[in-house]
Amino acid sequence: MSPYKKAALAAIRLVAVGCIVLSICLYLPDIFQLLSHQRPRSVVMLVIKAIPLVAGVWLFWKSDAMAEQLTRDLD
């Protein structure tokens, strides 16, 4: 594996993990609210907070192909 592909792969995976951690941080107040036996505010907000999670998982899953495509011309 070329060093350019390794760097691109690391950068893409770092962004993906950042999206996943952001989504977890956004969900923490709702988790604590559920643990205190209160209902979440709205389902729409829960779906909106899930967007970074889905994007992060998709980026992590496609990171190898994306890194290959980004570094194809550099080899």
Image (cartoon, rainbow, N blue to C red):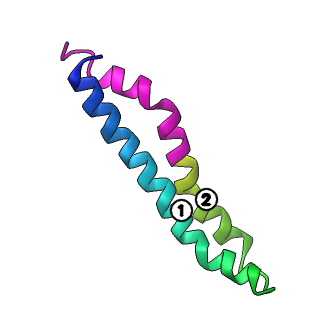
Of the two numbered discs 2 and 1 on the same chain, state the one appearing first in sequence: 1
Q: Residue at x 39, y 27 (%)?
A: 66
Q: CA distance from mark 2 to mark 1?
A: 6 Å
Residue at image point 46% right, 54% down? 19
Query: Percent position (x, y) of residue 18?
Result: 42, 55
Q: On the picture, is 20 further left or further right than 32?
A: left
Give the labeled residue for mark 2.
50
- Between 40 and 18, which is closer to the camera in this rendering? 18
Residue 44, position as x, y percentages in the image: 69, 69
Amino acid bearing label 1: Ser
Q: Is residue 53 left or right of residue 46?
A: left
Q: Amino acid at mark 2?
A: Ala
Quarter of the picture holding the C terminus: top left
Which region shows up in magenta? Answer: 56-75
Crowd around label 1: few <14 · some 14–19 · many ≥20 (10 Å)? many
Secondary element under disc 2, as helix, strand or loop, is helix
Residue 30 located left or right of residue 7: right
Residue extending farthest to the left is 74
Mark 2–mark 1 CB contact (< 8 Å) = yes
In the picture as drawn, the residue positioned furthest to the top comes out as 75
